[in-house]
Amino acid sequence: MNPSAPTLALVESPVQLLNVLEWAHTRRRDDGPLLTTVPRQPGPARDRDPARDRDRNPARDPAPARDRSGPGTAAAGGLRIVVVPPTDPMSRGQLRRVAGLVRDEGHTVHWQEARGGSGSPAGALAALAPAVRRAERIVVGDPFSRFLQLLLVPARAAELVVVDDGTATMEFVAQLGRGERLRRWHRSGGGAASRARELAYAPVSAAARRRLTPRDGHAVELFTSMPVTPPPGARLRVNDFAWTRARFGPPRLTRGTDLVGTSLVETGVVDPFRYLDAVRALAREHGVTRYFAHRRESPEKLRALSEATGLEIVRPDLPLELIARRGPIGRTVVSFPSTVVHTLPYALTGTGVTVAVCGIDPAWLTATASPRARGFLAGVTDTARDVRRLPLGAAPAAG
């Protein structure tokens, strides 16, 4: 691989964008000046995001700086990141803030709308395809994304890097190793129309799986905090949040306990009433004072939680790993099975913070939850390192 080869990263969430930054830092540390970036000071000028009026969030996020160089133009160090944002305001706000950190490190960020009124998937695919075709190294954040899978069809890159998209990485590696089609763990079978769409899309999914499979002349690297065994031929590089630890902290610790929220209700996996009772029980048992909301949790659900528990609801403006490292953070952080039970022990190493995980009782699952849900969530809990495991009795089911 030519050290100066153009590198293109494609991300759709704040966590993916942070992990691309972590990957660039770690790979430069491990392999030398593969990505020689020139840090620059953030400029004061900010152009207006056309979508800002449509998705303004409570934090009044600044719009991303306008990028006139296009999606295929590399920064001085060769790493160029394309952000394809979702439509929800909290995700967009976090993406803007992480993009600012990425630019401060000397990388280039291109904001490509593909959803909602200001962009379409077809238009975004047409705009990005030439850059994808030219890239010699592609870094991706969500191999389950259908938009990303479509983008990989014209790819000719000799190296493909998959950075963490949370616990979904565990399922991705397992499915790739078994030769299965790529499918998110929480999705159920659906009806006839859904199966017909899956059948029509199957050739694209199969092509993406081939791109993500190591072979002669095509290297695949997995950059992750998850406890996984890479597929044969793939390289595993551990994401220990070295950049985050070097840039922030150590945090000031509060006397209370913080609880990390989850979007399992929003994805249809956990019953909302059972979840509310579980949060109430954890708050009472462990002296929880703050609830850090997941960016996809609905305002209605958070309002009900606040009224039922009296907890302070915090909507983070950055991924939780950065929030926790900057502080203040509780001496104990409790979470349901989620990405943070794997990432926070790395980000908070040496700080004295205890990360505790409360498993999901099978009785909390909805009737429509995927058959994979129970085993997958248990696996997330059982494989977490350096955490304290709470008994299910600490959060009893409703009734």
Image: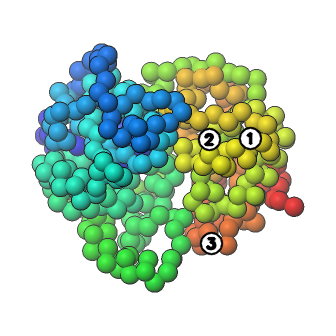
Above or below residue 54? Residue 122 is below
Q: Amino acid at mark 1?
A: Ser
Tell whether 353 sits left or right of 2: right
- Which residue was labeled with disc 2? 293
Residue at image point 51% right, 77% down: 189
Q: Quadrant of residue 306?
A: top right
- Image mark for residue 306: 1
The colour scheme used to paint the residues is rainbow
- Residues at marks 2 and 1, CA–CA distance in whole angstroms: 11 Å
Crowd class of label 1 (few under 14; some 14 to 19; many from 20; radius 10 Å): some
**Which of disc 3 and disc 1 is earlier in sequence?**
1
**Which of disc 3 and disc 2 is earlier in sequence?**
2
Give percent across and percent down for residue 317: 51, 32
Camera sees residue 377: yes
The residue furthest front is 53
**Which of disc 1 and disc 2 is earlier in sequence?**
2
Q: Determine whether label 2 and label 3 are within 8 Å by CB.
A: no
Q: Amino acid at mark 3?
A: Thr
Residue at image point 64% right, 37% down: 292
